[in-house]
Amino acid sequence: MNILEGIRTVDQLEVENKRVFVRVDFNVPMEDGKITDDTRIREALPTIEALRAKGAKIVLGSHMGRPKPGKREGLSLVPAGERLAELAGVEVHVPDDCIGKTAQKVIFDLRPGQICLLENLRFHEEEEKNDEGFARELAALADAYVCDAFGALHRAHASVHALPRLFRDRAAGHLVMKEIRSLGRLLESREHPYVAVLGGAKVSDKITVIEALLERCDAILIGGAMANTFLAAKGLNMQKSLVEGEKLPLARTLMEKAAARKVELLLPTDFVVGESIKAAEGKVVAANAVPEGTMALDIGPESVAAFGAKCKDAALVFWNGPMGLFEQPAFSNGTFGLAKALTESTGFTVVGGGDSAAAVQAAGGDIASKFGHISTGGGASLELIEGKKLPGIEALRP
């Protein structure tokens, strides 16, 4: 089935002089009260500008972090509102709550084209509980609903799942449409060779996505700490490296499935090792010769070259998960080197959000601009690739 079947787009809504609740994903990284990456805010601009051009009164709702009951410090959306105002060139009103009289007053005073960004939805625990009463309080603030929070589509939370069902006029925003169309290509396309590159720490986090990709891919390249578990399952001594001991049988099973389906499963042949994750420098060693007292913290140059060569002539490439501890300069070459290599691929390249997207942005230069698509949602993109139905998408259907 077409993932977007029956779903209207924001451009199909009649919104002149109407209050439109737009669920955005402004859950941006912060450091010392400052936004360190405003990508998610920038990606929301096309939908916001389209609604402003049509004379809508815009009510934005988002979560930020995972606040504990009664705790708000560092999780306010005020900095996001300030950054949006700079990017959009208009005033953005941010009331001190997302429901109640203060929010109502700000919203009912809005004129066409004006914007209100509600305070963090998760300051109310009912948001994560998908509480219909909370959803009704939010629904009272608007006349129509638009979802543009791709990174939250896999969460059955009130503003994503219960709320849209309370509106007759509901639609997907430009970002959600772009994400679904780009990632949908990985699900529906028959283009080959199709190569997936998976990294990150744990095999257990990627079991279902690996199994799904085994049905579609010609090759799966595995890096990051999860590669250690596969190599350990083949009998290599990974010394102090992170290995999921209880997942060794699973790793063997996945390798057997890959062989049975004639899917090439490529593992690193060399690593950059250090004595701990705090090591300031690393040493390149063969994968079968990790020195005692050290741990693999990045894939080595030989592996980067092999992975890059495999991706170069691919028609489709999906990358999720860093190749190593890229936040540390000594262990960043694997991830950044792969990012650069993927820009030379002749096919459609997709980065699956989360740490991978952050790594591409950190790789420097104009590398990010050379990818076919960089997703704004890690968990949502993986669940889509797995073939799961996303609650936020299902709630938009008639």
Image: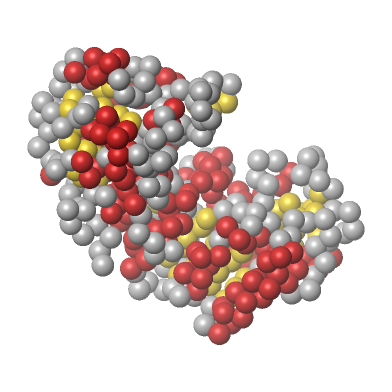
Which residue is the extreme one toward the front? Answer: 133
Horizontally, is 174 left or right of 225 in the view?
left
Horizontally, is 151 left or right of 309 in the view?
left
Q: Total marks drawn?
A: 0
Quarter of the image where one finds residue 152:
top left
Residue 109: image location, x then y, percent: 19, 14
Q: Nearer the viewer, residue 140 or 147?
A: 140
The residue positioned 53% from the left and 42% from the top of the image is 358
Quarter of the image where one finds residue 117:
top left
Q: Nearer the viewer, residue 343 or 349?
A: 349
The residue positioned 28% from the left and 16% from the top of the image is 101
Q: Is residue 12 visible?
A: yes
Q: Nearer the viewer, residue 246 or 344?
A: 246
The residue positioned 46% from the left and 22% from the top of the image is 76
Horizontally, is 213 left or right of 182 in the view?
right
Which residue is the extreme one toward the bottom? Answer: 260
Q: Is residue 375 visible?
A: no
Residue 304: image location, x then y, percent: 64, 60
Residue 380: image location, x then y, percent: 42, 51
Q: Quadrant of the N terminus?
A: bottom left
Q: Nearer the viewer, residue 229 or 174?
A: 229
Horizontally, is 135 left or right of 28 in the view?
left
Residue 91: image location, x then y, percent: 29, 16
Placement of 55 over or under 302, stated as above or below: above
Placement of 356 over or under 288, stated as above or below: above
The residue positioned 51% from the left and 28% from the top of the image is 69
What kind of colouring is applied to the model shown?
A: secondary structure
